[in-house]
Image (cartoon, rainbow, N blue to C red):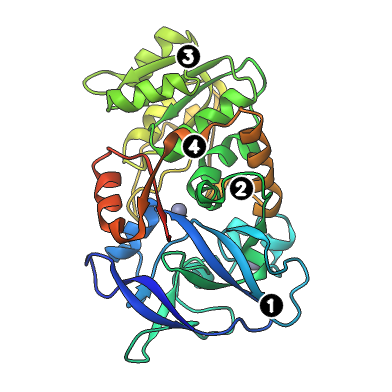
Amino acid sequence: MKIQAAVTNSKGEDFKIETVTLDEPKAGEVLIRVVSSGICHTDMVAQHQEYPVPLPAVLGHEGSGVVEKVGEGVTTLQPGDHVVMGFAHCGKCNQCLDGHPYVCERFFELNFVGKMEDGTCRHHNHDDQDLSIFFGQSSFGTYTVANERNVVKVDKDVDLNLLGPLGCGIQTGSGAVLNRLKPQAGSSIAVFGAGAVGLSALMAAKAVGCGTIIAIDVHDNRLELAKELGATHTINAKGVNVPDEVKKIVENGVNYAVETAGVPGILRQAVDSLSIRGVVCQIGAPPLGTDEKIDVNDLLLMNKTITGVVEGDSIPRIFIPQLITLYKEGKFPFDKLVKFYDFEDINQAVTDSKNGTTIKPIIKMG
Ligand SMILES: [Zn+2]
Ligand SMILES: [Zn+2]
């Protein structure tokens, strides 16, 4: 079938909406009419080839939509289902079997190398050239084909336009807190970076009853929003010693920290902000090869823990419906992060996201 998709033809080039041919779903796959898609930092990382996703490609990995057709052997989805698309994973390796599909042994291959599991593509351009699939979903298009495994059925009583970012950015931040750190009620947490991922972590900390929630960023407008979403304290990191400021709020340091900025040097600040036995979770992705200087005695004598997590350590089919439940109860108001754009305005949405005027852009396919 013919669809419209925002194609990335060469490194760093703007998205270009083109007519693209989409193949039928094969065994185990489904055809989805994409309703909307969030834009995540990793889309820009691929657009600028910091991750070498083969081009041309159709990017996008926070898609929501409606199942139109199911391939042979699909049992968990049917036409008409409302769905969110998550990351691709094999479902068969030790990590997948052990309940950690986000560290699937084939994660890089299935999400960044541009092919479906069988090594072929579903999208082709006007010259009949293959277009890479991204994160097993390529949600920057009016339709797509995805493996049943990375498609999550969701309730029909919530606005489907809103739900795509649950498949990546929002679950990344909230899952680090809810699935990995599991903070005790009344405990203290510092969130470094108040973008979409950091604010999702913050809302999750609020939802589970953390007592002191400190948001740290360099943009006052983001810190204002952090307060609205549940931060008890904020620190503008410009020109201050952040661990000192944290310890003015919680004398012996915080029980938990999440580092979402991915900026070299901030992990060390987070470690220095922790109390004895404190845990910091690294979620922001610094440039490949980034070194950080850590005092080993912080780990030994102070019993601090540094852990990393991607995609919120989540099993999307379990976790995304949980986030939707929290949202419906008013405990996870992630809609406050979102601004909607028409599909044609995708490049504007990217610009607004980069300069910080929009926290989480979502493009509507219309
Ligand atoms: Zn796997
Ligand atoms: Zn993402």
> In terms of image quadrants, where is residue 72?
bottom right
**Amino acid carrying mark 4 in the image:** Asp
- Residue 255 lies left or right of residue 356; in this view the side is right
First of labels 3, 2 by sequence position: 3
Instruction: Name the residue beneath numbered marker 2.
Output: 313
First of labels 4, 1 by sequence position: 1
First of labels 1, 3 by sequence position: 1
Per the model, the C-alpha gap separating discs 4 and 1 is 32 Å
Height in image: 326 above or below 106?
above
Residue pictured at 30% horizontal, 64% vertical: 47
Label 1 neighbourhood size at 10 Å, few (<14), some (14-19), many (20+)? Answer: some
Q: Nearer the viewer, residue 154 or 195?
A: 154
- Residue 77 in view: yes
First of labels 1, 2 by sequence position: 1
Q: Nearer the viewer, mark 4 or mark 2?
A: 4
Instruction: Name the residue beneath numbered marker 4.
Output: 335
Pointer 2 residue Cβ closer than 8 Å to ligand 1: no
- Residue 50 lies left or right of residue 4; in this view the side is left
**Amino acid carrying mark 3 in the image:** Thr
Do labels 3 and 2 touch, CB within 8 Å? no
Per the model, the C-alpha gap separating discs 3 and 2 is 26 Å
Q: Nearer the viewer, residue 338 or 55?
A: 338
Instruction: Name the residue beneath numbered marker 1.
Output: 28
Instruction: Name the residue beneath numbered marker 3.
Output: 232
**Amino acid carrying mark 1 in the image:** Gly
